[in-house]
Image (cartoon, grey):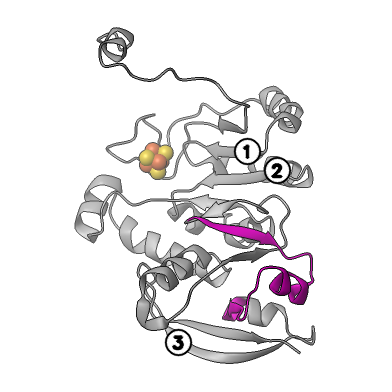
Amino acid sequence: MRATLPLLRQYGFPAVRRKRLETLQVNLGYRCNQSCVHCHVNAGPTRTEMMPDAVIEEVIRFLPQVATLDITGGAPELHPRFRSLVSRARRLGKHVIDRCNLTILQEPGQADLAAFLAAERVEIIASLPCYTPELVDRQRGAGVYERSIAALRELNRFGYGGELLLRELLNNRALKYAPVGFLDDDPAKSGKLIHGLKVYAGNGDLTEVCRQHNVNEVLISSTVKELVVGSGIKVKDRGAHRLKGVPEEWRLYRVLQD
Ligand code: SF4
């Protein structure tokens, strides 16, 4: 391998200075339900290397020093301590990222994984190597494209689609919306930026947040609508919308304010 530092010096690359540590990324192991040809850690179903319990405990002890726990693998969800680690981090108020291969949601014993991730408000980072079924399956295994899309649909049912909605509102001028931010009562997400827009803490006081930030319309998905049944919050149907990257239509509702 060629030395990089002399090249950087030659082109006047600015000095890289370490800032405050914010994210702890941990690789829980090399076991994975897939064995993709491009996998840089050569993960797969026959790999046995997993993070030992003692190291998991070390990670938990370190958590107070960071804001975000970023979990990867292999398929990190296959580690027997995955869920307890996520829950411990969330109880400590940490933002948790799960680098998920999507098809893990359909593996035996993972039927409630989407519900768990949504309940713990875990951010999911997932990707496909291409948009065509043929190339995805060639790289990741037969049927992976279809199973990944099914997993995305399942995640959308649990409310993982807000970022797609925001992108559509920003890009589709016909909708005539000027989004000002997200509302989320998860304190770990408060103040973060998504496509340059801030996440505001809900704190259960929707009217106050809207007044403070000059918001005149709040949109929610059908999932949230079902969650607020019985809360006294009134909503009005704002129609079905197609979002790029979401196979089915999204029905949106406007929160009516007194
Ligand atoms: S899903 Fe990710 S970790 Fe698993 S084999 Fe593919 S690239 Fe590797």
Task: Choose the circle earlier in sequence order: 1 or 2.
Answer: 1
Mark 2 element type: loop
Q: CA distance from mark 1 to mark 3?
A: 35 Å
Task: Choose the circle earlier in sequence order: 2 or 3.
Answer: 2
Residue 38 locus on image (x, y percent)? 28, 37
- Quadrant containing the N terminus is top left
Q: CA distance from mark 1 to mark 2?
A: 7 Å
- Quadrant containing the C terminus is bottom right
Disc number for residue 240: 3
Question: Regarding ligand 1, which quadrant of the image does it lie in?
Answer: top left
Task: Choose the circle earlier in sequence order: 1 or 3.
Answer: 1
Mark 3 element type: strand
Q: CA distance from mark 2 to mark 3?
A: 34 Å
> Within 10 angstroms of label 3, few (less than 14), some, or many (20 or more) residues?
few
Q: Which residues are magenta?
A: 196-223
As shown in the figure, which amino acid type bears the numbered disc 1?
Leu
Q: Is residue 68 magenta?
A: no
What residue is shown at x 65% (from left), y 46% (from top)? 95
Lateral position of residue 36 relative to residue 82, left or right: left
Which one is nearer the viewer's eye here, 164 or 96? 164
Disc 2 Cβ-to-ligand 1 distance below 8 Å: no
As shown in the figure, which amino acid type bears the numbered disc 2?
Lys
As shown in the figure, which amino acid type bears the numbered disc 3?
Ala
Q: Which residue is mark 1?
A: 69
Residue 156 locus on image (x, y percent)? 51, 69
- Contact between marks 1 and 2 (CB within 8 A): the answer is yes
Q: Which residue is mark 2?
A: 94
